Image (cartoon, grey):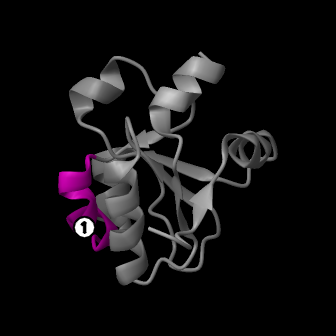
Amino acid sequence: MAGAPTVSLPELRSLLASGRARLFDVRSREEAAAGTIPGALNIPVSELESALQMEPAAFQALYSAEKPKLEDEHLVFFCQMGKRGLQAMQLARSLGYTGARNYAGAYREWLEKEG
């Protein structure tokens, strides 16, 4: 999708190093358990819509993490190859999360270059 708000690996490294990104792994629990980007919160794409519409306390109880705010910048979604991350970013944006972005290189690129 041309013009999609994507994040490159160098930009992701910088955002993570400065603590300015919230990272969401939207792969299945099994995929994430086998390895993920450090600091990522696993919310499978099939659960994402309901998760992003939960009350903050319910989100905290279920995911042991603070629910992202609509105005948060740099909410970075990723999957294995890029497709589910793109779907997740589009879904988050449709719910009003204007800072939602997709790490297009996905876990495959991270593992190849960082793993």
Q: Is residue 103 left or right of residue 60?
A: right
**Residue 96 seen in render:** yes
Residue 9 screen position, x and y as percent? 67, 40
Residue in the picture at 37% in, 35% down? 80
Q: Is residue 99 above or below residue 34?
A: below
Q: Could you say whether the residue bearing mark 1 is in a helix, strand or loop?
A: helix
Camera-nearest residue between 11 and 55? 11
19 or 35, which is in the foreground? Answer: 35
Quick one: quadrant of the C terminus?
top right
Residue located beneath label 1 in the image: 49
**Would you say the magenta stretch is mainly helix, strand or loop?**
helix
Pick the quarter of the image with the N terminus.
bottom left
Extent of the magenta region: 44-55
Direction from residue 38 to residue 88 in the image, left or right: left
Residue 47 x/y as whole percent:
20, 55
Residue at horizontal 33%, vertical 71%? 91
- Give neighbour class at mark 1: few <14, some 14-19, many 20+ (Cα, 10 Å): some
Q: Picture coordinates of residue 87 (x, y %)?
A: 32, 62
Going by the numbered disc 1, the residue's amino acid type is Glu
The residue nearer to you, when weighing 113 against 94, is 113
In this view, the residue farthest toward the left is 46
